[in-house]
Image (spheres, rainbow, N blue to C red):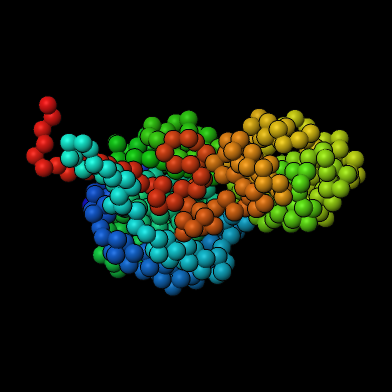
Amino acid sequence: MAMPNAARLSVAASASGAAPVDVPAVLSQMGRAARAAARTLALASAEQKTSALKAAAAHVRAASADILAANAQDMVRAKADGMSAAFQDRLALTEARIDAIAAGIEMVAGLPDPVGAVIESWTRPNGLQIERVRTPLGVIGVIYESRPNVTADAAALCVRAGNAVILRGGSDSLGSSAAIHRAFVAGLAEAGLSPDCVQFVPVADRAAVGLMLGGLDGNIDVIVPRGGKGLVARVQSEARVPVFAHLDGIVHVYVHEAADLDMARTVLLNAKMRRTGICGAAETLLVDEAVSATHLKPLVQTLLDAGCEVRGDAAAQAADARVKPAVDADWDTEYEDAIISVKLVPGIGDAIAHIEGHGSHHTDSIITADQAAADRFLAEVDSAIVMHNASTQFADGGEFGFGAEIGIATGRMHARGPVGAEQLTSFKYRVHGAGQTRP
């Protein structure tokens, strides 16, 4: 069901500042349109969805100049509003980043279609053949801030999994996200899919978020928030539909007593400083007391020399005069900036206990050459992603081979870790009989 022309014009007028918009009416109509589109998309062939995604990627590349122009305007406003450097990095687009967005869509296009896949099958003693089969979730609502690339990532994954999606980007990235959305849906239309499969809310009115959290009259099946703590906390508190989300990314790197120093230094620097504003960036370094004499000072100096502020316990402060004293709140803080807290721990059990007490069940990594220690860490740390001898910045759907991700889920129900196309499906049972009746 397409949005009526009057509603489309109303939204466009609102986005340009020309006229007010009846946000509840427009969002309600978007919900109905998404539900209708979801029913047809769920039945679309894998080949049609693949063609649509490939066309969407081509249109994103072709619209690079328009997307960059819109992003430049968003960046001007962001700087004027005093947005932090880390958040500006999330918002900024370049030709290379746009090409990466298109490549991500193409990667999703190349993934096996999860819809209709038989997860498991068995035959009962009475001859009934039962299959558990993947099905789309329905309509996904994605609410996000700053990162315009989420527009394409979420759209591609939802289409691949047969779900319609309503995207609500942040006011800071409104122009950039809208430009990406226009290019994406042009690809859908080229392949014969309804543009209503991927809708974008191009108004900054916060009332749109509340309406989506209410489920749009039952038309949204799940909400995925992607943004800061304020947004995610609001979504988790107010949502009347299921939520896939993480509130904090308090990520740890634990340097075990059997860690190779050069590996630890390389992995730690990447985990913290590659991109400091992403949810997989390390926020706390734990160093085993057994290697404090050989490892602590070089690791701290590596961070400081790279421009990272270090807040540490007494041992870390003694390692380098530039280290600032850590306070209790530091162990529970997601800095999203070039800041890290550093603590010495007596052993692996204490490291695991610290992570359990202060972590957010997102991503944690151990650096060690001791396989038994690694196995214990991987088994006992209750995080969505646990790593051995690898940078925590690999906590990303693309790096997992999912093509892209719609977010990292740290809950324990349904999806956990990077939420890719497969995680955006549910299942149903197909039962094949030959006239059986139940006694």
* Residue 372 in the image: above or below residue 197: above
In the image: residue 215, left or right of residue 44: right
Using residue 188 as the reference point, say whether residue 100 is left or right of it. Answer: right
Q: Residue at x 50, y 48 (%)?
A: 418
Residue shown at 55% from the left, 37% from the top: 247
* Towards the viewer: 71 or 191: 191
**Position of 72 relative to 286 (above/below):** below
Residue 421 in percent (x, y) is at 40, 52
Tell me which residue sits at (46%, 56%) in the image. Answer: 402
The foreground one among 91 and 319 is 319
Residue 43: x %, y % from top left: 23, 54
Nearer-the-camera pick, 370 or 92: 370
**Looking at this rendering, what residue extends furthest in the bottom direction?**
62
Q: Is residue 332 visible?
A: no
Q: In the picture shown, does residue 430 fall above or below 176?
A: above
90 left or right of 141 in image: right
Q: Residue furthest top?
A: 439
Examine the rendered structure and indicate whether residue 331 appears above or below residue 258: above
* Placement of the C terminus among the 4 image quadrants: top left
Residue visible at 25% across and 65% down?
192
Q: Position of residue 275 (x, y in %)?
A: 65, 55
* Corner quadrant of residue 377: top right
Horizontal arrangement in the rendering, residue 391 relative to residue 129 (left or right): right
Residue farthest left in this picture: 435
Residue 403, position as x, y percentages in the image: 46, 59
